[in-house]
Each structure stands twice: as C-alpha cells, then as structure tokens.
Image (cartoon, rainbow, N blue to C red):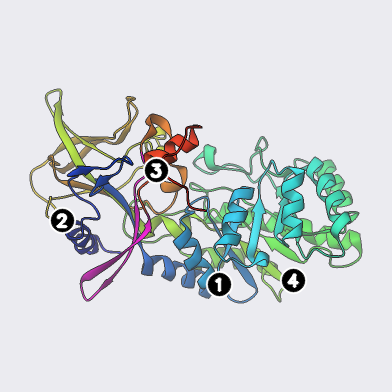
Amino acid sequence: MPISDVSPVLKQALEEQMIGTPTVLHDDGTTSPPPMALFIDVNALKENFENCKKAFGDGFLHAMAIKANPVSRCIKMAVEAGIGIECASIAEVMHGLRCGCPEEHIVFDSPVKTRPEIDYALAHNVHLNIDNWQEMDVVAEAYNKVKDTTKAVIGVRVNPVVGSGSMAIFSTCTATSKFGVTILDDAVRERFIAKVSSTPCITCLHVHVGSMGCKLELMAEGVQKTVQLALDINKRAGFDQITVLDVGGGLPANVDTEETTPTFEEYVKALKDVVPEMFPGKGPFKRVITEFGQAFNCKSGWIASRVEYDKEVGDETHLPLIHAGADILMRTCYLADMPKHQKRLFVYGSNGDIKEDDVCLQDIGGPLCFSGDVVAKQRQLPRANRGDFVVLRDCGANSISIFSRHCSRLAPPVYGYVVVDGKAQLTIFKESERVDDILHFFGGESTWPRQS
C-alpha cells in the first residue's frame, strides 16, 4: 500500500472522530475521540490470502498464526477466504471455533498442552501437533480412548537443527531450542523413527525453522530434512504412515520499504528447488500445512497516534511524546538494537496531510513510565508538534496481539478500511478497551455487565 494511501484514511478517521484530539473523558476511561488507533487495510489482507493460495497451489491448508493478529474480524476474513488458523493456546482454539473456523482447519501448537486441553482438541477434531517425547505418550493415551470417534490429525514437531538465522531470539532450530524433538545425532534420529513408527496415531511431521531473520534457504533446508525423516519413518513402518506435512510459518516481512519481499512465490520456488517431493502429488503427502503470521498481517496494518506533547532534549534532539509505545510495540522498544523490528515513521499534520518539511533529529517517546519506552531513536523526520500525528507502518502483526498491561494503559480501537475512488470507508473491528476490562483482568469488580 503506497504511503499516499494513508492520508485519505487518516482524514476520514479524523472527520468521523474515530481518532483525533480527545475532548471528553468518559466514566469507562475511554476518550472521544481516541488519540490512537490501529488501522487494517482489508483489501491488502485479503490479497495476501489469495497470493498465498495461488503461489502454493492445491493440496495445502494455510493456517494463519493468530498470535500475530487475533482480531476477530480478521480471523473471520481468513475463514471466509478458506484460510485456517494456527493456535498457540487453547484460548486461541476456542476463539477460532467461535469465529466460525471449521474444526479441521484449526492447528493447535503449544509446548505445554495440558491433558484436558488435549482431550478438548481431540473431541473437536482439531489438528494437534505434539512438542516432545513425553507429550507423545500423553497424546497416544488420550487418542486411544477416542480413536473410534475423533477425526483429529496428530503430528509431532521436530527440530532438524539447521542453525540460527540473523536473530537468535526468533530462531527455533538450534541445538538448544525449547521447541520440538531435537534430532541432534543419528542415535536420536533412530530412536525417533522407532518411536513414531510404533505410534500409529501420529500421521504428520511439523517443522518451523523460525521467524524474522531466517533466509528462505535455511527454511527450505529445515523442510528438506523433515521430509527425509518422514520418508524414513514410512519405510520403517512399511506403509505411508506420515501423509501430512506441516512446514510452519516464518516467512519474514520486509519492514525497510513498502515492497513485499520475500514473496510467497519466492518461498515456493526455494522449496521446489530443494524439496519438490513435499508438494502433494509428488510424494506421500496428501495435505501440506503452512502457518504464516507476519507474512499475512504485517504490512496490512499501521498505527496512527496523536502527538500529545513535544519537547526538546539536550541541544539537538526533538522529543515528541505519543500514545503508542512498548504497550503495543513491545518488540520495537525492547529490541531497539534489532533493525528488523524498528518501524518506518511518518509525520502527518492535524488535518491528515503528510508533512515533509522542517526535518530535524527526533526521538519518538511512548506513554509508559520507563526509559526504554521509545519507538524511534535519532531519526531525521519532519518536526512532529503537539496535535500532529505519527504514523507507524508495518504494524498489522504482533502489535495489538502482544499488548502489555504495564501501566494499565487501555488498548486502542482497531479499524478496518477500504479505499474506494480515493475515499476511505472505515469499520470498527474492535472498540477501545475500558477501565472495567483492566479491573476484570486484575481481579476487580466491573461496574457494567460483561457481554457473553
């Protein structure tokens, strides 16, 4: 989405008082209008779904990792597009079911599933990926009790140890990773083949090399090793036991420019070059699953925040203070030394027009009461003054989904929009959080009845 497209959306939001200069503080803690919001480009998100399906072709279930964006309207858009959801908790599983996702399109990944959660997944025919040796026994026991009624597919996550990408914190295929069964040597590999081939309920292998900082070649290598492991299990079993492959997500999102790179097409090419037998019809796999989060969501969303105050720091640095900080951009602030988590920033005037002149050195501070709450340091930007708006791009993933309770800030509203003939049409996807939500979270009594 070109930068120029933001202005009509921001202007429309200002006109409809969906964002702006707060004039009223309500009893529920919200203000009218709110000073900050997350905006989701509906067409961009839908286009990402379609581009993914087109690139991979038939035989794939693309399950959106909703830990990146659990906004209900976005999940429903994914479901309408034939996209499944990947869940990292039982709450996400229930969320997906309530948003209308078919049971067989839900993938449940978590390294700490409890026995009741496993029973729930089996009862609801959800695809369940085992994380470790002990869980294999727990799931096998649970499965054997319902094997005549459940349609759940059971997979097991493997760590083929292909190494770390450029960001170790997001790499999951190192020798010391917390995820999956680590295939560290030939002895462990043999033990794993023996275990799985004697556990017939396991019909899927799952791999996820990592997110952000992992090159396509590294991701493809992890898939190749996992496919070879599946072929060896099938040979040991004497039949095609492993007929489902889950290649995870991890396709990184470019945050340096407006360009979308790498693309789904580029990833498919990298996979076909290294492991063509993973594709349905080329090997034993009747179904292949992906779990994209960043790639679907990152570039479809942006945050706009009013500059509440602006001040000078030292002799040369201008310091605007905005309402978006480490509460909604946790990775940006806490991983300040990682360029891939820093956001592109633009300054807009109070009327919604982009500002281009009066460039100066600026830090952009957030609203929280600790020194690390800075979303940009030493940036050359048009001077952001009180009443202006700072727009942060590439915020569709891992923003509202990892909102922090620190300082008890209220989570902002989320708006979806389309632009038709240069005019934005906005819809409320999620209303502003209220103080009673905070009270409920911390065990206080609500003053208004909660909706079921």
Q: Which residue is mark 1?
A: 82
- What type of secondary structure mainly makes up the magenta span? strand
Quarter of the figure with residue 367: top left
| Disc number placed over residue 352 in the picture, else none | 2
The percent coordinates of residue 378 (x first, y second) are 23, 34
Callout 1, which amino acid?
Gly
Specify which label sits upstream in the sequence, 1 or 2.
Answer: 1
Residue 36 % position (x, y): 27, 47
Q: Nearer the viewer, mark 3 or mark 4?
A: 3
Between discs 3 and 4, the one toward the N terminus: 4
CA neighbours of label 1 inside 10 A, class few (<14), some (14 to 19), many (20+):
some
Residue drawn at point x = 64 percent, y = 40 percent = 174
Instruction: Single out the mark in the foreground, 4 or 2.
Output: 2
Write the start and end of the magenta stretch as one range: 410-430
Give the alpha-carbon distance from disc 1 to disc 4, as whole Å: 24 Å
**Which residue is at a point 63% across and 54% down the rendered structure image?**
221
Indicate which disc, 1 or 4, sits on the residue closer to the N terminus.
1
